Amino acid sequence: MDEAVTLPGTPPMVAAARAYVAALLAGTPRADDATLITSELATNAVAHTPSGTEGEFTVRVESKCADGWCRISVEDQGTIGWSRAAVGDEDAESGRGLAIVAALADRSGHRRSPQGTVAWAELIWAS
């Protein structure tokens, strides 16, 4: 399976991205992890890139469910500038998204694309 959806870069579309991934991966052992990862990556796209100022972002799910593998990616209209810096203020309301993605994913990263940046995470489960 290789499915993608492009959404407007508005905060309500983060929930739409979550629902999209949850529906595609329903019944897989890591569906909840995939949904949370999608939420974090989509939130970053909307909050920290030009995608969130009248732009858009694309969520892609590649999966070989029978092989116990999926990759979730979010492409935004931003520049590479993401880091996995340590969380600073424990009381801050933000700043933990990429740490959450790294903790849940078996592999994660980001790369440049012609449109901006693609952040991705892979999940593996016993098939």
Image (spheres, rainbow, N blue to C red):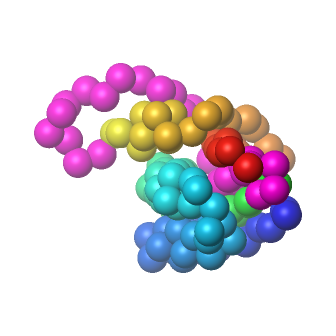
Q: Is residue 79 magenta?
A: yes
Give the main secondary structure, helix, strand or loop, of the magenta stretch: loop
Tell me which residue sits at (14%, 39%) in the image: 91
For this rendering, which residue is in front, 93 or 114? 93
Q: Which residues are magenta?
A: 65-94
In this view, 106 is above or below 127: above
Point out the image quarter for the N terminus. bottom right
For this rendering, which residue is in front, 87 or 63? 63
Tell me which residue sits at (84%, 62%) in the image: 2
Q: Quadrant of residue 51?
A: bottom right
Q: How many numbered marks are there?
A: 0
6 with respect to 64 (left or right)? left
23 with respect to 53 (left or right)? right
The image shows residue 81 at horizontal and vertical percentages of: 57, 32
In this view, 74 is above or below 100: below
Tell me which residue sits at (79%, 44%) in the image: 113
Q: Which residue is outermost to the front?
A: 127
Q: Is residue 77 magenta?
A: yes
The image shows residue 110 at horizontal and vertical percentages of: 67, 36
47 with respect to 117 (left or right)? left
Tell me which residue sits at (63%, 61%) in the image: 28
In this view, 64 is above or below 88: below
Tell me if residue 122 can be seen: yes
Tell me if residue 20 can be seen: no
The image shows residue 119 at horizontal and vertical percentages of: 65, 43
Q: Which residue is outermost to the left?
A: 91
The image shows residue 101 at horizontal and vertical percentages of: 50, 41
For this rendering, which residue is in front, 114 or 111? 111
